[in-house]
Image (spheres, rainbow, N blue to C red):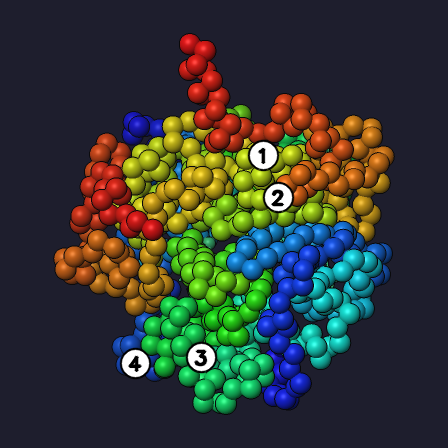
Amino acid sequence: MTNSNILLRVEHLCKEFPVDSGFIAKRRGTARSVHAVNDVSFDIAEGETFGLVGESGCGKSTTGRCIMRLIEPTSGKVLFKGNDVASMNKKELKDMRREMQFVFQDPYASLNPRMTIGEIVSEPLVIHNVMPKKDERIEFVRGLLDVVGLNPEHINRYPHEFSGGQRQRVGIARAFALRPKLIICDEPVSALDVSIQAQVLNLLSDLQQEYGTAYLFIAHDLSVVQHISDRVAVMYLGNMMEYSDWRSLYAEPCHPYTQSLLSAVPIPDPDIQHSRKRIILRGDPPSPIDPPSGCPFHTRCPIAQAKCSQERPELREISKGHFCACHYAEPNPIKKSSVEL
Amino acid sequence: MFGLGLKKKNRIDLRDTPVPEGHHLLEVNDLKMYFHTQDGVVKAVNGVSYTLDRGETLGVVGESGSGKSVTSLTIMGLIPMPPGKVEGGDVLYRGKSLLDMSEDELESIRGNDIAMIFQDPMTSLNPVYTIGRQLSEGMRLHKGMSKKDAMARSVELLKMVGIPNAEQRVKEYPHEFSGGMRQRVMIAMALACDPDILIADEPTTALDVTIQAQIIELMQELQQKNGNAIIMITHDLGVVADIADKIMVMYAGQPVEFGTRDEIFYNPIHPYTWGLNRSIPEPAIDEKHPLTPIKGNPPSLVDLPEGCAFAPRCPYATERCRKEMPKVYTTKTGHYSKCHYSADEAFVRANAPETSRTKAQRIVELKGDM
Ligand SMILES: Nc1ncnc2c1ncn2[C@@H]1O[C@H](COP(=O)(O)OP(=O)(O)OP(=O)(O)O)[C@@H](O)[C@H]1O
Ligand SMILES: Nc1ncnc2c1ncn2[C@@H]1O[C@H](COP(=O)(O)OP(=O)(O)OP(=O)(O)O)[C@@H](O)[C@H]1O
Ligand code: SF4
Ligand SMILES: [Mg+2]
Ligand SMILES: [Mg+2]
């Protein structure tokens, strides 16, 4: 990947949320915080789909929200087309948001129930004053509805008249209204049935082909992420543990956490599911308020050594373009470390 | 659910009565449960049939709203009536009809012979009682255990489901437990009286895959030890592939296909099962295959299509499908399907998705030709 087509670059992003921010805690100096995102760096090229996976609460959504500056990062940098998002003024931020859109997880909560779907989809056009003529706008929105597989005749209906999958299409039509360069998709299919999920995944792929949009695709379902992504990053407790192109990440996971995640996903094929090796992790993920010292995964890691609880492993390049943050990671050690069941 | 009134009942322990000749542990025959609402009659469960024996696991899969939970809640006698009404069919447990039982009799069965893990762990634990007290309740009620014995058994159960420091944790409240631990408490609670049948309604949906793997492993271990039957309701075909012996695929309140795990995965004969199969992203190694979604949306249960409920979305639907409700076609092995064309071998061969088994076969044949 050449430097020139890098669309988004995230450098050492950190986000902490204060907890017990009460006066007394502050006075005592015991105010604690949730380390939601901890020193995360990656980049996304134009037209690329970058998948972000990890278990609940590992900081995926927070990463996405910091990138759009919906919340302020604690430290670190976000560069969109080479420009620092943190130092943008109101006007620049507005311009950036024209090119960077968001699709949310919950198709029920994310659409304003009092607006018709026509109003919802055309809202970005109005905010950015792109298509001042109403007739023209309506025609455009009808076209968009058609593209995402909704009936243009339904332009005056309200969200509650649609199913979950249809609402997610409305959210996608809205995100595409301004032909953005990047769409942050935060669990766009998690709330949908498999048969509907497949419709929406195909739609996202088709639209990407047509418009060359890049996606930051956030999800916890590893097979969905594998299906849609060019590169995939795995997060754990706010940290980036491993990232690579999808082939080498899924075929040769290096990080023991990625290995156990992949081996824990049940495969819908009984022959394969019953014959494969599995690593079953013990215990629960630790609290992000009081994250473990050293490697955040060492409390559950099947191959942890003394060093792991003392020293935080840096992301290092294991093979070309394949990065992994583990002291003992090696290409494809799964065969050695897996537990026979 | 939340009451802690410990009335002594004249307990009947059906678990100790042998399954009568010609019967199964659990038999559901053409069960129908409709809800009478303002918007009309919701045909939530519209003719469900299956059998289950000890040691077996039944997987129930299907679209959201297809009646998976309502079917199990009907068996447990937990559907409020009205608005619910049983419109037909029967449920036999060890040869005895559960639908004919009095509320008293049902109560001694629930949690004792048949226990359920509910879809939402937070709403099924009472926030104001300690975990230990909630675990003890069922054992005192059903087994007449003393407070002390029940508490000791609670500690044992928590240890069994992998909760560290159990002596301490029985004294804590639900909010002090993580989501994964709460789900394990729910499992411990369901297992407290060694049930004959454990119904698990999406027990791992809210959990992360690494925790899901722990919980499934635990349920399998306990089943091996106790020989109980499991009904596992899930939308995850991977989970079903992992643990089910038999699978029921539901669509719009009906089982559209039922068979052994191998039959459903390697020889499915219903177009909806095919559609589900083609919708899941397969774990690819070097090349990704496009998904083939099922077009359209599930029908309203108030206003079901006249013919086959799947016809509006089925790529093979004919005029006949739209007019005439398909009959159940059953094979010699008990594998059944509700589609006009399931009996047509040529149709099935031409349209069923490729599986890892048919693929291996095809490759062998290809090599043979060369
Ligand atoms: N506004 C907030 N205030 C305090 N803590 C927060 C806030 N937002 C997120 N967190 C915490 O930050 C951590 C990361 O949350 P985040 O929502 O980014 O996780 P996620 O990976 O998106 O999880 P999920 O898969 O459940 O959506 C969590 O521990 C969460 O509780
Ligand atoms: N008390 C009720 N009154 C009216 N309709 C109801 C009631 N309870 C359930 N239903 C309807 O019955 C149908 C079946 O619901 P059920 O909960 O069994 O679906 P499910 O297959 O378990 O779905 P999910 O996968 O979303 O849990 C749904 O359409 C639901 O809206
Ligand atoms: S009966 Fe017809 S519409 Fe229904 S599943 Fe079979 S082919 Fe499709
Ligand atoms: Mg999130
Ligand atoms: Mg349900």
**Looking at the rendered structure, which numbered label has been put on residue B103?**
none
Residue A312 drawn above or below residue B178: above
Give the chain letter at badge 3: B
What residue type is disc 1 on? Asn
| Residue wearing tag 4 | A27
Labels 3, 2: one chain: yes
Q: What element carries label 2?
A: strand
Name the foreground residue: A330 vs A125: A330
CA gap, disc 1 to disc 3?
44 Å
Tell me the crowding category of disc 4: few under 14, some 14 to 19, or many 20 or more residues within 10 angstroms, Cα based: few
Label 3 element class: helix
Amino acid type at circle 2 is Gly
Give the mark nearest the N terminus, 2 or 1: 2
Quadrant location of residue A294? bottom left
Residue pointed to by mark 2: B259
Q: Which residue corresponds to mark 3?
A: B154
Q: Which of marks 3 and 2 is nearer the N terminus?
A: 3
Tag 1 and tag 4 share a subunit: no
From the viewer's perspective, is residue A99 above or below residue A292? Answer: above
Residue bearing the label numbered 1: B267
